[in-house]
Image (spheres, rainbow, N blue to C red):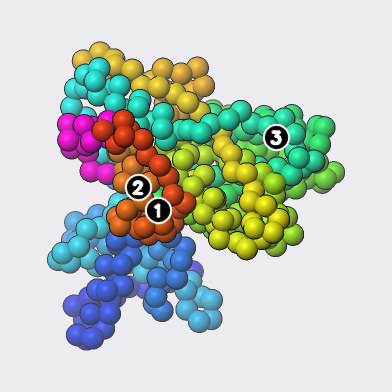
Amino acid sequence: MSTSSFDMAKLSPNERSDAMRTLTRIMEMLADEPTNALVDEWFQRAVTQYDELMDGRYLHLQRRDHTGRTSIVPIDLSGIQAPVASARPIHPALPPLDQADVDDLNTVFTFLISPCLPPPLQGDESGTVFVLAGNAILPLAYEFFDHIEYLQDDEPVTLIISGGRGHSTDYLYDAVARDKHLRDIGTEGAAEADVLLEVARKVFDIDYAIGNGSVTLLLDPLSTNCGSNAIESKRLLDNAGIWPKRIFVVQDPTMHRRTLASFEKVYAEDQRAGRQGMPEIQGWTLQPKVVLGEEGALEWETDEADDDQLWEPARFVSLVLGEIPRLRDDQNGYGPSGSGYIAHVDIPQDVEEAWGRLHTRLGVKS
């Protein structure tokens, strides 16, 4: 891999204009979610790694030329009047909260983690495919792989582990490093799917299960957001000749509902849904609640995970508040009336009202 760079000031006016359009589009996408989609003829994949240097701000992109050669391109963004996303955003400290704030947070969060069903007790004989979407909530992965081990003892299981390198991948790396049972896993530069496969190997002998046919593993090391989790998972199943009756998705609680809506969207668009039946999209995730701690701080109430295995409070609030605008089916949302990334989602009025109060009260940028 080679490293190259260019200086915006040295480009011709036309080149600078093209570069600015490209960078603006990339930054708009990265301010929301990174993507593996072809951005334009210059850049194939945005890499969510950023450095703030003393002499300016540099956006690191991965560029692939016509020969397949890959290079990392640090682009000097000094003086460019456009928002630059951060792979590790700094979340301002929350103001002291009151019980009304906590009640509103739980109202919105409970909506995001629903519908939530217990994992099914049958594997392939019921036409079920299991999908673990890459995330940093390791207790979720532990419990999920425990369930897969239980299932494969009796019936074959089709399992997808989905996740490339995205804007939250560093959080998974950090979670693995903090876990005394996992810290020997090498994470540097690894896709989330590869890291989570190593977690599975710590839980049970998945390689033996794959070898004897108890588990069919499909690995997606490319997807970087909820939409591409669904797209890449469907592509893997299509290539394997599998049209599932049911897809059981396991995801970070804050992204649970959006991920289910992403799977609903990509399968509903396939004409086979009318002929062979639309797969039933179900999901399970952890269901912690927040409670009011000392001096108005947020604390977790759950038996499913330790506090340090969940989100830092300010990041949690940012994630929760950021989901509702995405789920809306309007011109600014991800639904059919907006970006078209997800199926229509009905947001109850009490959830919208709770979100509005939180957004006004906390002023968190979502």
Q: Is residue 204 visible?
A: no
Find out whether residue 362 is within the magenta segment. Answer: yes
Residue topped by disc 2: 328
Side of 260 relative to 351 (left or right): right
Label 1 sits on what residue type?
Answer: Gly
> Of all residues shown, which one is farthest toward the front?
274
Q: Are marks 2 and 1 in contact (CB under 8 Å)?
A: yes
**Between disc 2 and disc 1, whose residue precedes?**
2
Q: What residue type is disc 3 on?
A: Ile
How packed mark 2 is, by other alpha carbons closer than 10 Å (few <14, some 14-19, many 20 or more), is many
Q: Position of residue 221 (x, y in %)?
A: 57, 55
**Is-magenta flag for residue 115?**
no
Mark 1–mark 3 distance (CA, rounded to whole Å): 32 Å
Q: Which residues are magenta?
A: 354-366
Tell me the residue at 51%/75% (across/down): 69
Is residue 147 among the parts visible in the rendering?
Answer: yes
Image coords of residue 347 (percent x, y)? 37, 39
Residue at (47, 78) in percent of width and height: 65
Query: Disc 3 designates what residue?
Result: 148
CA neighbours of label 3 inside 10 A, class few (<14), some (14 to 19), many (20+): many
Point out residue 313 in the picture as x, y percentages from the top left corner.
31, 29
Q: Is residue 65 above or below residue 254?
A: below
Q: Is residue 118 left or right of residue 11?
A: right
Residue 280 image point, x, y percent? 62, 44
The residue positioned farthest toward the top in the image shown: 294
Residue 210, numbered label: none
Q: Which residue is mark 1?
A: 335
Looking at the image, residue 43 lies above or below residue 169:
below
Question: Which residue corresponds to the image point at 24% horizontal and 54% vertical from the top-left?
Answer: 52
